Amino acid sequence: MYAPHPQGEAAAGWVTVEEWSGSSASVLSRTAVLTASASSLTSRRFGSRWGRIGSRMLGAFVPEGFPGSVTPDYVPFQTWDTLQGLSTYIRAMLSTQALLGAIGVGEQSATVIGATFQWFLRDLTGMLGGILFTFYQGSNLDSNAKMWRLVADFMNDLGMLMDLLSPLFPSSLIVIMCLGSLSRSFTGVASGATRAALTQHFALANNAADISAKEGSQETLATMTGMGLGMLLAHITRGHSLSVWASFLSLTVFHMYANYKAVQSLSLTTLNSERASIQLQYFKECSDVLAPKQVSQQEHILPFWSSWRKLIRIKLPHEHVHLGAKASMLTHTDMLEIAKTRSHYENTNYLLLDKEGSVHIFIHKQATPADVLKSFIHGLVLTNLAQNGKSQHAEARRWMDDKYTTFISKLQVKGYSTERLLSYSIVWRAHWLHGQLDEKLE
């Protein structure tokens, strides 16, 4: 930066340059001022050397441009995530110590080939488990990133518990080892996939790679700290089974609490089925939409919540909508119902069938992600109307024509991404032909 200078000295080449430091244009601090004339150079520095060193060290752990380059929920999530990671690495030392003892490390009767074979079976089971989990759930992890994040850490807790139990059941050692490895394989897949989705959420400045790298630095620091504390704890509790179990269970409870707080702090701006349902219900009542943080407070993120509701047969509105239904499930009665209501779905790439209290959505083979989102909202509207009495296809279509565009616009103003709906993979699509009396789907 050039500073103003006297007219007389300008002819002699007088100039002042200021040095500013910061990771972004919005977060800068002046560190030095240099002034040069024809005969001299003067400099003045601001701030302490230790402060500059601290800033450089901090740059290894936070993204460039922090905090303006990340979402507001980045700090609380990373804080709780680091704490849960710390507890994981402390417990890992206890469980690994127990597992190594179970396979015979330190015993004269143990053989190298026997221990190697047991470790090989353990790793092989984990690899196969990871592939199977990816096959069944891999494409669905981003639709419920919060829930799967909790599931991943719960399965990791279960795997560590298996390792700690292994010395107590020597006759079933291989089975317990393999079950523990299987649990951790689910953790690896689910945690990696949800972390990728969350990194994209945090990146306000297209800096997902930087956020991922700095998250790796944070995890490395937590790992080293946790390993050191874990080794100390393992040494203190060695030979005292009660102390080992008390420490392990206490850390596990804290780990689960920290994970819940981390996930609860997230305010995601993508639309999945539940968030879309919450927003639609509020929009119909108040003609406005909620901020992401308000929606996050209403989401159900505990994994057992869905199973518990199924047992008592309680369904949330979005659970009455079945996206991507199979055309081969249609009966003759269903086909006639579609023929009667098809006029309400002209110029759309989907068809809706109201059947037994649920709405089945048939997606056209040429439908775009925007069509899928629109079909799901249409299905929610029809579900809400159908719960008040008989099927209301005409009224649902009028609502879509009059208010859908406004609804989407308000979501965009609140910062939501409305390009697509995060949902389970749509495997089945359809193509239909219109006739006078019947409807053909293939």
Image (cartoon, helix red, strand yellow):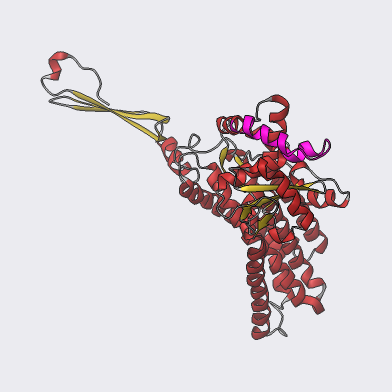
Q: Using residue 45 as the reference point, say whether residue 346 is left or right of it.
A: right
Q: Using residue 204 as the reference point, say whether residue 272 is left or right of it.
A: right
Quadrant in the rendering for residue 181? bottom right
Q: Using residue 98 as the reference point, say whether residue 347 is left or right of it.
A: left
Give residue 328's position: percent from left, percent from top. Answer: 71, 61
Q: Nearer the viewer, residue 87 or 348?
A: 348
Question: In the picture, which quadrant includes the N terminus?
Answer: top left
Vertical arrangement, residue 28 with respect to residue 366, above or below: above
Task: Please state the total of marks drawn on the protein image.
Answer: 0
Q: Residue at x 64, y 50 (%)?
A: 423
Give residue 16's position: percent from left, percent from top. Answer: 23, 25
Quadrant in the rendering for residue 127? bottom right
Query: In the rendered structure, does residue 278 fall within the stretch colored magenta?
Result: no
Query: In the rendered structure, does residue 398 fall within the stretch colored magenta?
Result: yes
Residue situated furthest top in the rendering: 7
Residue situated furthest front in the rendering: 436
Q: Is residue 46 visible?
A: yes
Q: Please tell me whether the stretch drawn in magenta is mainly helix, strand or loop.
A: helix
Vertical arrangement, residue 202 with respect to residue 289, above or below: below
Give residue 393's position: percent from left, percent from top. Answer: 73, 39
Q: Residue at x 59, y 55 (%)?
A: 193
Give residue 75's position: percent from left, percent from top. Answer: 58, 39
Find the magenta span and give its range. 382-405
Q: Using residue 71 as the reference point, say whether residue 359 is left or right of it.
A: right
Question: In the picture, which quadrant includes the C terminus?
Answer: bottom right
